[in-house]
Amino acid sequence: MTSPWREVLLESLLGYVSWSLCHDLSPMIYYFPLQTLGLTGLEGFAVAFLSPLFLTITPVWKLVNKKWMLALLRIITVGSVASFQAPNAKLRLTILALGLSSSLVVHAVTWWTGRGLQRYFRIWGFILGQILLLVLRIWYTSLNPVWTYQMSNRVILTLSTIATLDRIYTDGACYKPQEKKNGKAAKAVVSGLNWLLAGAAFGSLMFLTHWIFGEVSLVSRWAVSGHPHPGPDPNPFGGAVLLGLASGLMLSPCSWFPGSGLIWWITGATSAAGLLYLPTWAAAVSGCVLALFTASMWPQVLGHLISSGSSPGKAMTTAMIFYILEVFFCAWCTAFKFVPGGVYARERSDVLLGTVMLIIGLNMLLGPKKSVDFHFQTKNSPKALFRESEKYVKLFLWLLVGVGLLGLGLRHKTYEKKLGKGAPATEVSAAIWPFRFGFDNDGWSSLERSAQLLNQTGADFITILESDASKPYIGNNDLTMWLGEKLGFYTDFGPSARDHTWGIMALSRYPIVKSEHHLLPSPEGEIAPAITLTVNVSNKLVDFVVTHFGNYEDDLDRKLQAIAVSKLLKNSSEQVIFLGYITSAPGSRDYLQLIKHGNVKDIDSTDQDRWCEYIMYRGLIRLGYARISHAELSDSEIQVAKFRIPDDPINYRDNQKVVTDHREVPEKIHFNPRFGSYKEGHNFENNHHFHMSTPKYFL
């Protein structure tokens, strides 16, 4: 017998690789329709999830059970981690899909064949791989390091290659067909659930875990509301989610735990409904109970899966069909405007979550009432051996939890030290940027470069649109938390991740006193969000209204949204800054609605070459206005404006004279010379530069 520690460590690392491949394929597929706002055909790469279908063919099943073929599939799986090094997104997607398809075949072979104890460690390695993924995301502030940084990718590739070579050797030394079960286990198989329901439950549980627990901050983003009562902050509350998942895994093997009873399923279903419908803390507590329920299902569902019959291909294919359909339905719920049949899925996360819980519940109630290790017990692998191995699994699980909680604590302490560093000032600068979920125009993560760019703008308040990357098909990333901690800014995110918008992020150098999240009227098109905020800028309160309107094609939506936002502006304080993406030209109906009925002024009414991004204001003195080219970091420029807060909000004079020579204005209001100097027309070079006849200063 090999060392239990070695088995747990290596299988957990390979489990992490499997989960990482699964988590990354959907965002890589999504990147391409994101470019075109429509289906591209590359969605067909989702068939990679259906590779177990080939295992229903007897000659193929015999082939993949050969040692050399299994070794080749393992090598392809781990080799696909190097897809991050690919020169372009299409090649990366191809390699990634190949690796994922190989990974699923490897699971089908290794979970159904081999010694009982071997299979036990493989199953638990897959489960612990998800916990390892969460812990690494904690230390990398919501990001999966294997898909974020070149060095991390190389280190993980090296370690997983070593683990794979060890497993290939172990396969060769210990490989045996599935051992003959004892009489009780054989009866469990005969009386157990068929492959259809077991597969559906496994696929649905995978999706539920990916959707809501793919990152520990997601529950907080489902429960978020406006300040001063936004609900639990992702850090440190993510620690409660991690503890809930770990505790759920510990509950499952306990003989006293009613894990397959109706009461426990009702508890899980109720917590799912609570997360979906209840406000702030009530939703967050429901999320923790759902974490407990979800994790407790993993050993049971996997046990049902491998005992569902002698056709791994059928069971795994069924699982992946359900998983794919649920991921696509999840995407359809928000992207309904851009996909065929989207009208039927519009905002129907309730149907999706209800279906997932129902499938898991049916498997609970109708499946065999045995723990996962029971299905591996044979004369050669007695119960005592599994009990000994279980100790190592538990120890490693709680070691991971401890490392995760330590990471949250250190991050929280560091972030708290960064906050409140804004120097007293009478000037405030604001920026708006459509972010495209942290993807650059080549399909790679843009976060580090984005943080550097935003820092260089010197903006005190930044609104970033298209920033809800918490969805499973975008990467499960909390970009608000990442940028807030990186820049040392106060944050607000909204509306909630359960509200089917593309999200708005607000970053402020100064404390956010209060905020409110809004869903604007959207009868025809995508759901339009808005946030109203009050920020304490050196003991002076300034309101901000930030929004993202729907598409230009949805005329009624834009009309109603402009009316709604003009009311928000009118009801704001005398000192307000508007940062909006309104998909209308200067002078258009919606533009005039905001100006006239919202009682605000355009930062530069002479700038006629705008379409989406606008900065407007009231009760402030304008000082400067700049447009900075995106340089392929996104598909949209950054706009920045500078204002002075008047001492007397009633008796003051706004600046009217426009100058383009920075030498004519005080140095303290200059824009960063890193972006060059005044430039007319578009900047098509691949660097961030002022363009479109900016920067302009006002005297």
Image: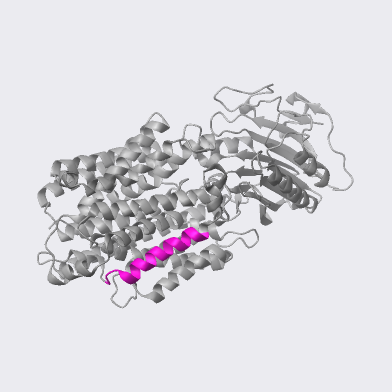
Left-right relation of 381 to 535 = left
- Give the dominant element type of the magenta stretch: helix, strand or loop: helix
Residue in the picture at 55% in, 62% down? 232
How many discs mark residues in the rendered view? 0
Q: Height in image: 197 above or below 451?
A: below
Residue closer to the observer: 450 or 191: 191
Where residue 253 appears, x then y in whole percent? 28, 70
Where residue 188 appears, x then y in whole percent? 21, 69
Where residue 17 appears, x then y in whole percent? 32, 47
Residue in the picture at 52% in, 61% down? 350
Extreme residue in the bottom direction: 256
Where are the magenta residues, as a range?
350-369
Looking at the rendering, which quadrant does residue 202 occupy?
bottom left
Looking at the rendering, which quadrant does residue 311 occupy?
bottom left
Q: Is residue 357 magenta?
A: yes
Looking at the rendering, which quadrant does residue 116 occupy?
bottom left
Q: Is residue 641 magenta?
A: no
Left-right relation of 647 to 472 = right
Question: From this viewpoint, is residue 247 visible?
Answer: no
Residue closer to the observer: 383 or 457: 383
Location of the N terminus by quadrant is: bottom left
Protein image colouring: one colour
Q: Height in image: 96 above or below 413?
A: above
Q: Height in image: 387 above or below 659?
A: below
Location of the C terminus by quadrant is: top right
Where residue 208 appears, x then y in whole percent? 42, 58
Residue closer to the observer: 501 or 80: 501
Extreme residue in the right direction: 651
Left-right relation of 306 to 553 = left
Question: From this viewpoint, is residue 401 visible?
Answer: yes
